[in-house]
Amino acid sequence: MDAVKVTEHGGTEELEYGSVPDPDPAPDEVLVDIKAGALNHLDVWVRRGLPGLDLELPHVTGSDGAGVVERVGEDVTQYEVGDRVALSAGVSCGECEFCRDGEASLCETFHIIGEHVPGVHSEYAAIPAENLIPVPDHVDWETAGSSSLVFQTAWRMLIDRAELSAGERVLVLGASGGVGHAALQIADYAGAEIYATGSSEQKLEYAREHGADHVCNYEEEDFADWILEETDGRGVDVVVEHVGEPTWRDSIKSLAKGGRLVTCGGTAGGAPETDIQRIFWNQLNILGSTMATPGEVDDVMELVWDGTFEPAIRDVLPMSEAARAHEMLQNREGFGKVVVKPDSEMD
Ligand SMILES: NC(=O)c1ccc[n+]([C@@H]2O[C@H](COP(=O)([O-])OP(=O)(O)OC[C@H]3O[C@@H](n4cnc5c(N)ncnc54)[C@H](OP(=O)(O)O)[C@@H]3O)[C@@H](O)[C@H]2O)c1
Ligand SMILES: [Zn+2]
């Protein structure tokens, strides 16, 4: 079968759509005929290579995908041939102290399909049954294949970690990205007043359509000054961070006393300068967040399936154009998710 593979860590020229051995599902796995998947910034990190991530190359990429069950391993009872399914990429052991506490994404051996083990941007993928989510018939493949990773991440960040409540003020950075645009919709659902940043007027217009009440082009204006002006010097209750180095200090400066900053990443650098004095004096809470628990995934995907949340699709590309898909993320082009499909599935 054909798959998107990284042949060497490096630039987009190291991506190839070509032949790899057919996957053979283990007893607890399901073979899925992939109809659509989507890019996450993680795919860019994996292609470039991450410290401590020692992958066998070529590595098949992709942490989001959906399709039809083609075959089930002998121990799988909850799925059958023909079922429509999507992937939830976080893998946990179910047995360690954190798993037993219901905190699967804190698992001692937590890992991500597409990052630490082969991904699903391929014609077929063998996926642990535990990592599949049933997809209702009315949901299209683009939605099913592009929602799980970013919506679960943003859901845990806002609902579980930051405990966002109605009427609170939240600042969403990078609102045009996958996590950012999911966070807008979730914050809107929670009844918050939403401030969003983006690097172009077009992105900010989309941010408004997805729930933002106030927007700021941070290329033209200092966003912390903007927040303080908009909130009469008070600041926001919650900041959703995933940009990192260039925004961190201003994210902290944007918080009200006792506010919460929740971060899941550092796209533009992971070792920012910080302002300790502001953290202790204003008694701020810095919260880390990664992926989500299976229960959180169920909760948020139910709201994707019923149309409450909807991924914005930047573009749909054949997997043979994976390099172009990576460029769209790296160059910060567009709003929402870039969908990829096996070339044989393009209309
Ligand atoms: N811990 C977890 O579980 C988890 C899960 C998902 C994602 N993440 C992390 O969260 C981050 C966002 O992921 P994503 O998939 O949403 O990415 P994405 O779709 O590529 O979006 C990134 C957004 O960040 C903004 N940005 C600001 N400065 C940037 C810069 N120097 N370079 C690139 N983008 C910049 C861009 O918007 P503007 O140009 O409008 O500012 C862009 O839309 C990544 O670092 C990812 O690894 C972590
Ligand atoms: Zn565990």
Image (cartoon, rainbow, N blue to C red):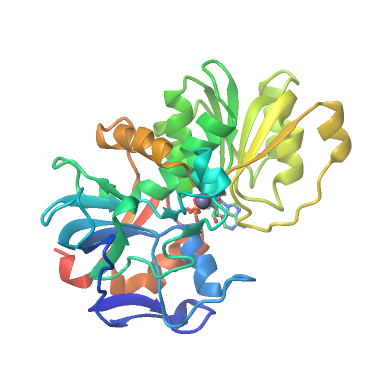
Residue 339 in sight: no
- Which of the 4 image quadrants contains residue 312? top left
Residue 334 in sight: yes
- Residue 187 in percent (x, y) is at 48, 28
* Residue found at the very far left of the displayed protein: 82
- 195 vs 91, nearest the viewer: 91
- Residue 49 in percent (x, y) is at 57, 74
- Residue 95 in percent (x, y) is at 49, 49
- Residue 130 in percent (x, y) is at 33, 51
| Residue at image location 63% in from the left, 29% down from the top | 238
Q: Is residue 154 left or right of residue 238?
A: left
Q: Please, is residue 240 above or below residue 325 in the view? A: above
Q: Quadrant of the N terminus?
A: bottom left
* Residue found at the very far top of the displayed protein: 167
- Which of the 4 image quadrants contains residue 31? bottom left
Q: Please, is residue 292 above or below residue 246 in the view? A: above
| Residue at image location 68% in from the left, 20% down from the top | 231
